[in-house]
Amino acid sequence: MKDTAARETANHYLNRDLSWVEFNWRVLEEAQDPETPLLERVKFLSIVSSNLDEFMSVRVAGIKDQIKAGHTKKDFTGYTPAGLFKRIMKRSSKMVTEQYKTYRDMIRQLGREGIIFTEYDDLNATQRKAMDEYYHDIVFPVLTPMAVDQARPFPLVRTQALYLAVVLMKEGDDPEDEPYFAILQVPSNLSRYLAVPGRANSKKREFILMEDLIEKHIHTLFSGYIPISVHAFRLTRNADLTLNEEGAEDLLEEIEIQLRKRRWGTPVRLEVQKGIHPYALEQLTEEFEIVENIFEIDGPLDLTYFMKMASSLQGFDHLRYAPIQPVYPSELDDVEDLFAKLRQQDVLVYHPYESFDAVTDFVLQAAYDPQVLAIKMTLYRVSGNSPLIQGLARAAESGKQVTVVVELKARFDEERNIAWARKLEQAGCHVVYGLVGLKTHAKITLVVRQEADGLRRYVHVGTGNYNDNTARLYTDVGLFTSHKEIGEDASALFNEVTGYSAPHNWKAFGVAPTDMMDKLFEKIRREAKHAAEGKPARIIAKFNSLSNQQMVDELYAASQAGVEIDLIVRGVCCLRPGVPGLSERITVRSIVDRFLEHSRIFYFENGGEPEVYIASADWMTRNLTRRVELMCPVFDKSIQQSLINILRLSLKDNVKARQLQPNGMYEHVRSEGGGPQLRSQFEAMRISSWKTTTREL
């Protein structure tokens, strides 16, 4: 009876990792959509690969660690680590097969458009001569063949680098003798795809892959030996860092040590080219001690190279979306003194439709303004040449108090953030690495300014990183304000992160890990109470992922109390919507389109007096309990309305939206009866569509 009840409870939830796999399927569907421009589809196919790389190196690596440690306990969705691994492998393998089927179809379509990936043997004599010269002059000098035998142990194989496995026999040996084995890294500092000189009177662009060119010249590396087979392989290692933050004397140095160890991480996945020689496969599997997570790929390994090709290829703009020109926020346009404007009103910016330059200008004006006394800012992921870093350094050099909370543990951005931290310290900034055991994921900038009537605080709170590059690719919102309570809370937040302040009694903010989850629970329960009392009750929440069991249970309870709940969840969702008696008043939709949906916006009807919040946090356990996160109220009614309109557009999307079904699968939302289509991201490009004053949900 107890086991039956446990199974029934587990059926209330969708598994986080399997939900992620379904999200990547939705990305793959975008690569297959004939309505999407061809080179944009190429990008989506590349994203499928990069997504899967990170998933394998982090999530699947963690599951394998659990299996190795002997964990057999089921999670709240009813899966043991071993059972979950088996399901992930089955679904992921099917996805990869479909991905390469899409790849082959895409190559044919690119060929029809004059973008041709060719084989060396198909080149004419002139083209072969040019590629031979490129190989001998450029490629050959950087190649390092590495034999594997009793005297030469297996060399380090770097995670997610491309290698060739070479099986050879010595000239004059009996073909029945055991062959020789060597590996060769394909140079990562040379282009993966190589332009081939054009044929006479042809406007087509031809390319050959680097590994194919090397394979055709493999004999130049092994004189006296006969190559039997040459096949590509690629290893994915566990990429999670194991940090002893409390025992580390210097967190920056500890992370640098762990980054060096990452290259030796436990093997998690092995990708091999279809048809690989059995002896080569035996050598690889024995060395990496991997037998379960092997993908045999019918095509080139690692399609992430497609992203650069699709972005940089000249002369094919008709195969891309027309470039978007972000507009400068009208409230700040032609405003010389941003602070004077923000004393009068709050301002919302919506990226990428509105320019990130407004955020840069806010920091730069603060850096050069003699009345500004202090600038405090959190940095999680920044671009490679961020103007914000330059502005902060300039402010410190001019004598301002500049405090920057740099999150060194931002996964895969650790090295870049270490470099920024050192540069800022050299400029005189106070650089803080956050709190032990917690990642600082909040997005906030505080400017303290001396004015005629005393000190005034100006704040920018965002849902996305302070990264000018991703601000052109992700949808995020940011709020500029000089609201007194928000300013006071901002000061208190920085004091907690940089000093020894006790938890603050927040006037406006909800802050994780201290009270954000409790505040969200309180607001969800208030909606349930209002529904029971016959008052207006509704929740609309837009974020990236929902995986916290308590949060799911609170939403279930609110649904059962009569609250209408609409969730716009781009990726992982553990809640099972539309289940009678459990969640029939909950809908979940996901939008995957040209831009990565990234904004976090929460709406609570509150009995007819709506509350609207923006946040850095998703509704995941890690965000709510293991990170410093921020949820900020929006007090300005017109900005509340703009955010409501952004939610409205997402809820009306019937082109790129998919709705989660009770069985865990997603179905496209289509207009009923052939009605008008609405594509939320394209509609949002018309700024008036989300800055109107009509309240409609």
Image (cartoon, helix red, strand yellow):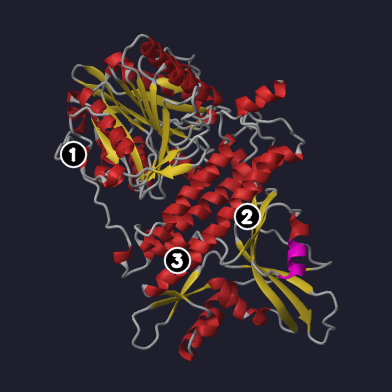
Looking at the image, residue 646 lies above or below residue 585 = below
Q: Residues within 10 Å of mark 1 (few under 14, many from 20)?
A: few
Instruction: Return the mark for residue 106.
Output: 3
Q: Nearer the viewer, residue 70 or 213?
A: 70
Q: Is residue 354 visible?
A: no
Image position, residue 273 (x, y; %): 63, 66
* Type of amino acid at the residue the image marks with label 2: Thr
CA separation in Å, label 3 and label 1: 37 Å
Q: On the picture, is 542 further left or further right than 273?
A: left
Which residue was labeled with disc 1? 688
Main structural element of the magenta stretch: helix, strand or loop? helix
* Type of amino acid at the residue the image marks with label 1: Ser
Image position, residue 425 (x, y; %): 45, 38
Mark 3 or 2: in front is 3
Q: Secondary structure at mark 2?
A: loop
- The N terminus, quarter of image: top right
Looking at the image, residue 525 lies above or below residue 580 = above
Which residue was labeled with disc 2? 159
Question: Which portion, as a residue range, is magenta?
Answer: 277-284
- The C terminus, quarter of image: top left
Which numbered disc flags the more N-terminal residue, 3 or 2? Answer: 3
Q: On the picture, is 475 further left or further right than 5?
A: left
Q: Secondary structure at mark 1?
A: helix
Q: Is residue 282 magenta?
A: yes
Residue extending farthest to the bottom is: 125
